[in-house]
């Protein structure tokens, strides 16, 4: 069983800087990486996902908007056999950590 979430939010961080910062923390396999259009599609697998998830496909697009950007992300969560995923738990676990980090560290990925 799987769950798909879609998010869109506005960030005060410019698209090139946020894209650079987020891609550095992505591990495993990147299926599509379009640096010119700030788009990537990445597959995550392994023990790091815990005991409920088999894999996650993360698709994200950063679009410039004023001094910041709009982030459009779609996550496809694939659970392990017999596990029913709770959408509320998934949404609570997602955060804008990269944005917060970049705001606190203005020279990183500048």
Image (cartoon, rainbow, N blue to C red):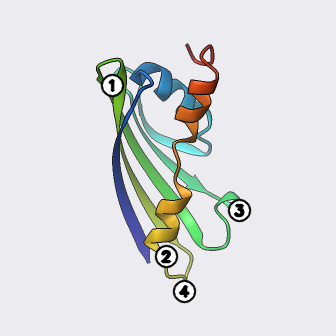
Circle 1 — which element?
Answer: loop
Circle 3 — which element?
Answer: helix
Residue 6: x and y, percent?
A: 34, 55
- Of all residues, the one furthest to the right in this rendering is 47
Q: CA distance from mark 4 to mark 1?
A: 38 Å
Residue 59: x and y, percent?
A: 40, 46
Compared across the picture, whether 86 is left or right of 25 comes to: left
Q: Is residue 100 above or below residue 35?
A: below
Position of the C terminus by quadrant: top right
User: Front-most of 83 and 106?
Assistant: 106
Q: Residue at 41% of width from left, 21% of height from top?
A: 14
Q: What residue did someone put label 4 on?
A: 82
Res 85 label: 2
Viewer-nearest of labels 1 and 2? 2
Mark 3–mark 4 CB contact (< 8 Å): no
Q: Residue at 53% of width from left, 48% of height from top?
A: 95
Q: What residue did someone put label 1 on?
A: 37
């Amino acid at each position: 069983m799987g769950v798909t979430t879609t998010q869109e939010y506005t960030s005060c961080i410019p698209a090139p800087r946020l894209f650079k910062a987020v891609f550095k923390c992505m591990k495993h396999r990147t299926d599509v990486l379009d640096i010119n259009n700030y788009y990537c599609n990445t597959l995550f697998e392994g023990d790091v996902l815990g005991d409920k998830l088999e894999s996650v496909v993360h698709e994200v697009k950063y679009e410039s908007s004023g001094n910041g950007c709009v982030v459009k992300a779609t996550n496809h969560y694939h659970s392990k056999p017999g596990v029913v995923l709770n959408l509320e738990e998934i949404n609570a676990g997602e955060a804008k950590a990269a944005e917060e980090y970049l705001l606190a560290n203005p020279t990183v990925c500048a």
